[in-house]
Image (tube, rainbow, N blue to C red):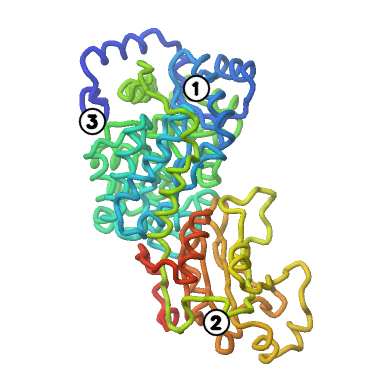
Amino acid sequence: MIELSKKPFCLTEKQINNLHEIFSVMSLDEKIGQLFCPIGSSFDEEQIKEFIEKYKPGAMMYRPMESHKIKNIHENLQKYSKIPLMLAANLESGGNGICLDGTYFSRQMGVAATNNIDQAYNLGMIAGKEANAVKCNWSFAPIVDIDKNFLNPITNIRTFGSDKDLVIQCAQYQMKALRENCVIPCIKHFPGDGVDMRDQHLVSSVNDLTVDQWDNSYGKIYQTLIDDGVETIMVGHILLPYYTKYINPEINDEDILPASMSKEILSGLLRGKLGFNGMIVTDATAMVGYNVSMPRNKVIPLTIENGCDMILFNKNIDEDYQAMKDGIESGLLSIERLNEAVLRILATKMANGLFEKLNEFHDLSIIGCKEHQELAYQCASEAITLVKNRQDVLPISPQKYKKVRIYNLTDKTSGGFKEEGSQRRLEDYLEKLGFDIDVYDYENLNFYEIFEAGTSYIKEKYDLIIYVANFDTASNYTVRRIEWIKLMAADAPWFVQEVPTIFISMANPYHLIDVPMIKTYINCYSNNDACLVALVNKLIGKEEFSGVSPVDAFCGKWDTRR
């Protein structure tokens, strides 16, 4: 049962009456439309008008684009929508979650590494202001997962780390700033990612914590934020078997479903035990983890029937809308649950001023502004962590190490997607400081070096070796580990006992698992320009290292500490 006068809605009697008036005149098609948040693919005004009039969605999300373009799209979406839309973005690391020209402030783990809670507020403030400027009003952030498994390829630097209390505190400050800028927070990914080593984009992943373990970790996070009045929660395609069986002891293993469609987890745990009264949205339903549990035309209506209020994205929008209609006709989705879901969506909009259109919008000049870039640098400077320092190599200078080889380690196949983050390289900065830089050429391998040259060759040519790893956290990867050249692992650091070697990770704190022999290891947490500049200043001794690792960067292995 919805309690509209209580958290997170806290609606007045007048607002409740207005809400019911709006609801009472809605057609079945309009109600069904509210249940969906499609991904936007229409760009000109006429296309947008046709889309809105046909599907009548409750929310929409567009991928990041130039700020003036996305603002225009958002304005047109609202212009043609009878009921105001929730306009979403993944505001996980700043305004870049909605604007290509927005500020890449920091990944969440970089914020946590500063050991300065003000940086969590700054993350929310910058993301909120820049999203507000383009009329984006719903943030799929903060991420409140716990990074328990260093092999997990999708949580990683997107989290605030492995300490549940730090996760709670950072999320609270980030959400405070988002709300101050008229952006609705959505915490994710309930019931908690980061335990499994698999990505729910590719498979229904598993959180296999016991009931007590979950209550004392993820449960504490969600209970605290629910009690604080969090407005919306995103539910992942993640199985929670021990809790499912605790709520329903008769269920068979083969019948346990991912949380996004599980009645036990949605209605029994999230609504029941945790007392969440707000709006529940699925994670993207295009993910493999959602689609493999049952036929899509069945799971779409059952997802709403079992406790979710909104479906995120589609495989085929016409098929999904028809599946919802067919589900109502066949009884898979009851009218009672349909109405309850729609009321929660409308109440979320009402509680956050979408009907009143009172939000005060920032000017586009705020996007990527100097002030935000300066704050991003401050965060980077405080975050960068000297994890391992077992050789006398820092600080570096051209006088001490004139000849430097750099290995740029990254994905060899990007699938055609533009790499997020800084497009500059460390060598751009070091050359200007007077170092002689040789960048390892992966396109034209030196076969003499690989097969014939020995230690003397390396020692004569280089005074210092620097590895820069940029394996950024992204969806649809099975692992985020270092991949060496298959030809004799030619780019691996076999020479560490002969030539001083530094390993720098821009975007993954766990690379020591693959280079335990490294004596000087640095984590940056974010592949943005601010981190790169701050890194150089620390390498040359202009700034001290002050970051504190929010996770076990040694991956629990004894050899990584040597």
Task: Give residue 387's position: percent from left, percent from top.
Answer: 41, 72
Q: Quadrant of residue 383?
A: bottom left
Residue to which mark 1 is pinned: 57
| Vertical placement of residue 124 versus 322, above or below | below
Task: Look at the numbered disc 2 and give the secondary structure of its residue.
Answer: loop
Residue 306 can be seen in this image: no
Q: Quadrant of residue 65?
A: top right
Residue to which mark 2 is pinned: 400
Quadrant position of the N terminus in the picture: top left
Residue to which mark 3 is pinned: 7
Residue 326 image label: none
Q: Quadrant of residue 439?
A: bottom right
Q: CA distance from mark 1 to mark 3?
A: 25 Å
The kind of residue tagged 1 is Pro
Residue 442 can be seen in this image: yes
The kind of residue tagged 3 is Lys
Task: Look at the numbered disc 3 and give the secondary structure of its residue.
Answer: loop
Label 1 or label 2, whichever lies nearer to me, is: 2
Task: Give residue 458's position: percent from left, percent from top.
Answer: 67, 86
